[in-house]
Image (cartoon, rainbow, N blue to C red):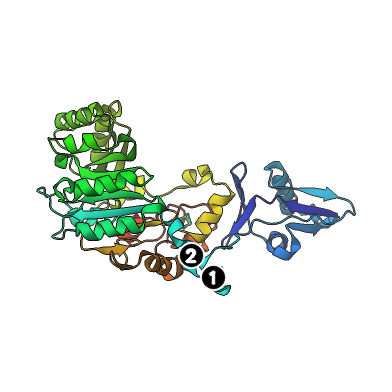
Amino acid sequence: MIWLYLYPFVFISEDLDNFLFYNSLIFKRICFKKNTILVSIVKQLQDIDQLYSVKIHVKDLEDVHLLNFVETIQALGLGDIIEGNLEKPLIMPPVLNLQKSAERLKEHKVPIGENILSYLHEVSIYVSGTCLFNCPDCQDRYKQYLCCTKSADVLDPALLKNFLFSTYYTGAAITLSGGNIFQYKGLEDILSILEGIDAIHTLVSDWRNIPEDLRLLSRIRKESFRLKILVNELADVSSIIAIAQKIKNLQIKQCWEIGITSFPEYEDAEILGEQLSGLVDDVTIRPFYTGENIDFFEECIFIDQEELDNIELDKQGVFALQALNTNNFGKITILSDGNVYANVNEKPLGHIQDPIKEMLCEELEKGTSWRRTRYDLEPCSQCRYKLICPSPSNYELAIGKNNLCHINPL
Ligand code: SF4
């Protein structure tokens, strides 16, 4: 008789036909095809009361599938065996301890609001919507990634100041976007408040809205801010480079984001990225789903087997995917009409004047953004890779499909 046991950093996931074993210490993974004997063994391993070990009779190892399973577990550092009539090994399987989850807090009547502000780490604020340009898809891009957008509203600077003071000590990083944020009347005052908040704040602007006169930017504390400059429409490369050079001369951190919708645009963006790379801190190429470029997305965004095989997540990373949407958690957006969102694709949580704690509690308890995981979405909930597959993003919402992957064709 032998004891087969798994190490406490090994996770098991499954779907209809396969088990996935994942070693969160050295990021190794392996799939086993299900059969009657493996199903019975793994079921016992998954039973938390069995403490991650299972008794196997030596005679059962004559089954070549079982023998191969045991040997693979050992070879990949997923677990080991103890031979002979020895005591059962006691190992704690990795189980998410929802000590602080909304359920647990409610169960013990701890007010959820108590620490809720500590979860807030990023607030994107659209201050005003004026802009002279007419980028295609201006009304849709910001719903897929943080991008400027036009609107007729202007956020009341007094309300914005009150909001900033109410979250001042959370240290949440603030991102200001618009329209053309440089035309926002209260901008200078707001920047001086942000300077006091201990975080790196971001000003988002299309490159054409960066003002000629950069005196305002040269007055801000350089360590507290960075510019995120968008190229929504690729044109006039020499003007783009000139702006990047001018900002570099002011020693302001700048990252650039080039929006693309197709492969030819991707190639142009790569060339521009290379030209910018010596001048700026970072260049990102950001695909945008237009509703008509699904082929492009299938090729460049959909996750494939190779990417899944290269994901490196530690134990906390796996737990985070089980409980939270790691793209959305801790983030809110305030649009220029004052509405507050956990995700701009969902219903607002409230208005900038409403108590922030209540809005965040509502999202943590019942919301559909901070806790939107693959465990609750079809068909991912039926897929073994939900264990390591990145949290769903806004692209899933734009495309109307939860699984942007080449694994599950449904
Ligand atoms: S997107 Fe969903 S179905 Fe596809 S691999 Fe990830 S978890 Fe599986």
Q: Is residue 290 left or right of residue 45?
A: left
Quadrant location of residue 393? Answer: bottom left
| Residue 156 at x, y percent in the picture | 19, 60
Q: Is residue 300 left or right of residue 239?
A: right
Image mark count: 2
Question: Residue beneath label 2, please?
Answer: 114
The reply to whether dot 2 and dot 1 touch (C-beta < 8 Å) is yes
Disc 2 element: helix
The amino acid sitting under disc 1 is Val
Question: Residue beneath label 1, please?
Answer: 110
Q: Is residue 357 left or right of residue 95?
A: left
Quick one: quadrant of the C terminus?
bottom left
The amino acid sitting under disc 2 is Glu
| Residue 57 at x, y percent in the picture | 84, 57
Q: Is residue 260 visible?
A: no
Asked if disc 2 is less than 8 Å from ligand 1, the answer is: no
